[in-house]
Amino acid sequence: MKRVHIVGRKNSGKTTLIVEVVKHLTSMGYRVGTVKHTHHRHELDTPGKDSFQHRQAGAAAVGILSPGMAAIFWPSDADQPDQSDQYDRLSALLADCDLVLVEGDSGTGADRIEVWRAATSTKPMVSDDPSIRAVITDDAIQVSVPVWQRSDVVAVATRLFELAGGKRA
């Protein structure tokens, strides 16, 4: 799976950037998948519904198929800090994507790009984590990694695509 993680502090603009990049790349004919990573416990299924009851009964995975939408739920080990096997499980479902953008998961060993805004009044994550590959911002910043202009979505999309090993977007 050709994936790049978009990381950053709360309200840094990660979601907005991902939406803009996805719109651009899909308009160019690329298939883009996204994954939202959260460190909060989140119930993805509706308690009381049939699929929820299937899971509560012990099903190893529960799928939901409806007109226009499909999903599959499986339990993950919340106590396991390394979630890389979860991405391996997702890779088969996202195999036909040219690029997968993951919002979050700053602890992954995969390529990470930080979105940063001075308005958040926080220092960039790259200050404490030099393994972050680049910072996306339109604000003045002094860091030891490349800075990509946030306002240039086409260039950002191209760089993300290339970082994932794809041909020029």
Image (tube, grey):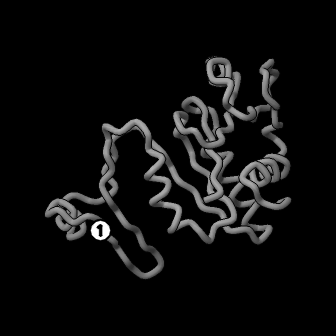
Image quadrant of residue 56?
bottom left
Q: Let me know if residue 119 appears in the view.
A: no
Q: Residue at x 60, y 37 (%)?
A: 7
Q: Is 35 drawn above or below residue 83 in the view shown?
A: below
Direction bottom: furthest residue: 67
Q: Position of residue 126 (x, y in %)?
A: 67, 24
Q: Residue at x 52, y 34 (%)?
A: 107
Question: In the visual, does 75 lie left or right of 169?
Answer: left
Q: Residue at x 37, y 77 (%)?
A: 65
Image quadrant of residue 1?
bottom right
Q: Nearer the viewer, residue 29 or 75?
A: 75
Q: Nearer the viewer, residue 52 or 67?
A: 52
Name the image quarter holding the C terminus.
bottom right
Q: Specify the amino acid type for callout 1.
A: Val
Question: In the visual, does 10 lie left or right of 155?
Answer: left
Q: Position of residue 103 (x, y in %)?
A: 57, 45
Q: Which residue is mark 1?
A: 62
Q: Let me know if residue 40 appears in the view.
A: yes
Q: Position of residue 75 (x, y in %)?
A: 30, 54
Q: Residue at x 17, y 62 (%)?
A: 58
Q: Position of residue 18 (x, y in %)?
A: 65, 50
